[in-house]
Image (cartoon, rainbow, N blue to C red):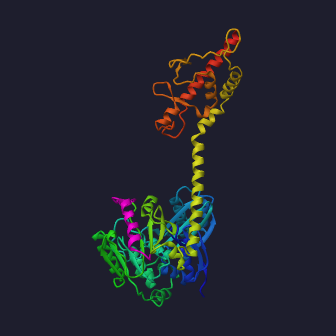
Amino acid sequence: MNEEFELIAKTFMGLEPVLAEELSKLGANNVEIGRRMVSFTGGKELMYRANFQLHTAIRILKPIKKFKARSAEDVYEKVKEIDWSEYMDNKMTFAVDSVVFSEEFRHSKFVAYKVKDAIVDRFREETGERPNVSVTNPDLRLHIHIAEDDATLCLDSSGESLHRRGYRQDSVEAPLNEVLAAGMILMTGWNGDSDFIDPMCGSGTLLIEAALIARNISPGVFRKEYAFEKWADFDKELFDSIYNDDSGEREFNHHIYGYDIDMKAVGKARLNVKAAGLTKDITIEQKDFKDFSQPEEKAIIVTNPPYGERISTPNLLATYKMIGERLKNEFKGNTAWVLSYRKECFDQIGLKPSIKIPVYNGALECEFRKYQMFEGKFSDFRSEGNEIKTDEERAAMAEKRRFKEHREFKKRLDEDAEMETGDIRSFTFRHHPSYEIAQQRLERRKKERRFRDDDGSRDTRERRPRRDDDRRGGQRREGLHDERGARGDRDQRRGSSNFKRREDGGFRRREDDARNGRTGRRSGGQSDLRGERQFRGNDRRDFKNKERRKNEN
């Protein structure tokens, strides 16, 4: 009887829908998309097939216990409760991998150590001996995931990451990950129904993954070993039948072409293609993309040009401008897909994409863009019944808009929090008790802000401008307005004073800073209030002195 149990397939962010579709075609039940993972249910055969046949999975995990982990002791006790004799003995080696998103546990390795201690102590108490840990080649691999206080302990059925197919003999600098390459091809919808071209092929990863998809060859055929082959309940006969079943493979009646300007890359790509046994389907030549010409047969381009992050590329923007020119003039009637990172690079292509799909290449948030090339006018292209976007592509674009909106919303929240932190010194000062005293003084001066002659009549004469070296409270001031009322208005705007302290001890206007390109901010991001505080402090001191003299009289 094929007992069904829960399984988890890990993948890269952005590839979850592609992986979910692969699992559904494989016969998985209860497929649910998560963040960088897809959960599903199935039996032992499906677990073997998932490892062997999925193009876009990194590893397949089998949960064995879920529990609440509110402390390190919770982790230790819950793991120790498991009957580990079902999975291993004290002669076997094991390793623990951990992923933690929790306020309680700040270091993932600490969680891994607690799991290790629990397993070792359980065996020591029951048998008097303990199993050893082996990081490089353990007999049993474990994975624990903690999100807040929800913990899931799993058996890792894959072992080494599934992106390590086994055909790569040599690589160029910063090679494209095999899982990402396969995901990109599957997102295009191409399944071998036309020629496939990568004009910047590097070590040939996209070419080999395209050939595997076109022929429906399982990517695990090159691997030497999976972690589940060391499990106590491993069914060798079942896995051999899966491994040797090539009934799903099909003929490929088109061809795959790869080009690169670097002859060293061409040599490495040819070596990898030969190791994969796909030289019949793939041709690789040295050729600059600027010399690319219109293919005779219908074709699709999928490429990953350099984008100046891990590979130093001179004239990067000129390269993308050349890509746009070649696509526009020498790829009419076909479709091109380009993966890149920088918006300015995409802008240089100069073509309007019909779809933009966000994906991650390592830690870089990239976009995978589709360019539909057509001959003549766009209206004629549409009148023939052609559509720029399929229903699936429209759904993907809607998902991208939601992704971007959430990202921008989070960015605004982060900026607001940062601004609040930066303004906290100003906020505290404005609500200091001494501010209330100064505010009362200003209100009183507002009511009395009239200059009169000795006879009490209104002084209408033009008053003498203040000298630049006038002093108040021992501090020199420059650029003050003539009217005393202007100073009062300035003092009301305490949070945004027009003055800041000069290096010589005086003050300069913030308007001058603005004209000179300065913002009035310190390098640390906080307002420069030191001069304002001292100036206002002297005002308050004068006010207190007057009050004291009044009381003495």
Q: Nearer the viewer, residue 303 or 96?
A: 303
The image quarter in which residue 223 lies: bottom left
Q: Nearer the viewer, residue 206 or 222?
A: 206
The image quarter in which residue 217 lies: bottom left
When the figure is inspected, residue 492 is found, relative to residue 220, above or below; the finding is above
Q: x%, y% of residue 361?
A: 46, 65
- Residue 375 part of the magenta segment: no
Residue at the spot x=54%, y=70% of the render? 123
Residue 8 visible within the image: no
In which quadrant of the rendered image does the N terminus lie?
bottom right
Q: Nearer the viewer, residue 323 or 9?
A: 323
Give the magenta range: 308-334
Q: x%, y% of residue 420?
A: 60, 43
Residue 2 visible within the image: yes
Q: x%, y% of residue 103?
A: 59, 55
Q: Which residue lies furthest to the bottom in this view?
A: 247
Total residue callouts? 0
- Residue 309 part of the magenta segment: yes
Residue at the spot x=51%, y=76% of the render? 380
Q: x%, y% of residue 90?
A: 49, 73
When the figure is inspected, residue 89 is found, relative to residue 314, above or below; the finding is below
In which quadrant of the rendered image does the C terminus lie?
top right
